[in-house]
Image: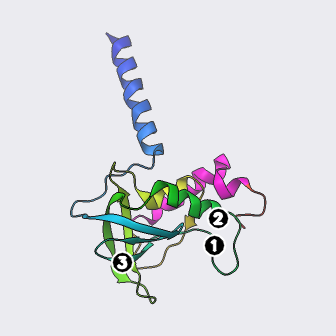
Amino acid sequence: MRRIAFLLLLAIAAAALAWLGSGRDDGPGGLVEARVDHVTDGDTLWLTGIGKVRLIGIDTPEVYGQTECYGRQASAFAKRLLPPSTPVRYRLGPEERDRYGRALAYVWLHDGRFLNRMLVSQGYATPLTIPPNVDYADRFVRAARAARRAGRGLWGIPGCAG
């Protein structure tokens, strides 16, 4: 009986670790449904009903103006992940718009994966904390540390992440 309990506990722990590493986070209640119109770059997209959206708490390398290291890869990843008409859910931050008029949002894929954190955990983005939009800052920092340790994405290219 002890062996079965131990194996069950081990299976539960393995499932929890897999879930945590997947970028999955079903988010809070009260999320707004939308569809992707198009992706501008790794951290900027257009959603139906709200327009241009800047993902809160993260920063991907630039692809416009002077292209930064790993910017093209981050942009391509976001475009592959979010083709036009992809359903998503979002929540605006306490500060709903930036100085450029973009909506500031946390975005979840329809399957529950947390886009903002996923970009960091895969090495396509670094944390960027700007109060008052700090709800998930600690998660983004932890995801970046894990990505850096694993050498994922921009962390795997010497000189790319600073």
Disc 2 on helix, strand or loop? helix
Tell me the residue at 58%/50% (across/down). Answer: 146
Residue 94: % across, % down: 32, 78
Tell me the residue at 34%/13% (across/down). Answer: 4
Q: Which amino acid does the dot numbered 3 rest on?
A: Gly
Residue 116: % across, % down: 45, 62
- Tags 1 and 2 touching, CB below 8 Å: yes
Residue 19: % across, % down: 41, 41
Disc 3 on helix, strand or loop? strand
Q: Between residue 50 and residue 122, name the one nearer to us.
A: 50
Tell me the residue at 58%/60% (across/down). Answer: 76
The residue labelled by disc 3 is: 51
Using a 10 Å C-alpha cutoff, classify the residue at mark 2 as few (fewer than 14 neighbours), some (14 to 19) or many (20 or more): some
Using a 10 Å C-alpha cutoff, classify the residue at mark 3 as few (fewer than 14 neighbours), some (14 to 19) or many (20 or more): some
- Establish if 111 lies above or below 41: above
Residues rendered magenta in the picture: 135-156
- Can you tell which quarter of the image residue 107 is in? bottom left
Query: What mark, if any, has residue 72 been given in the picture?
Result: 2
Residue 79: % across, % down: 51, 60
- Establish if 34 lies above or below 14: below
Disc 1 on helix, strand or loop? loop
The residue labelled by disc 1 is: 63
Disc on the earlier residue, 3 or 2? 3
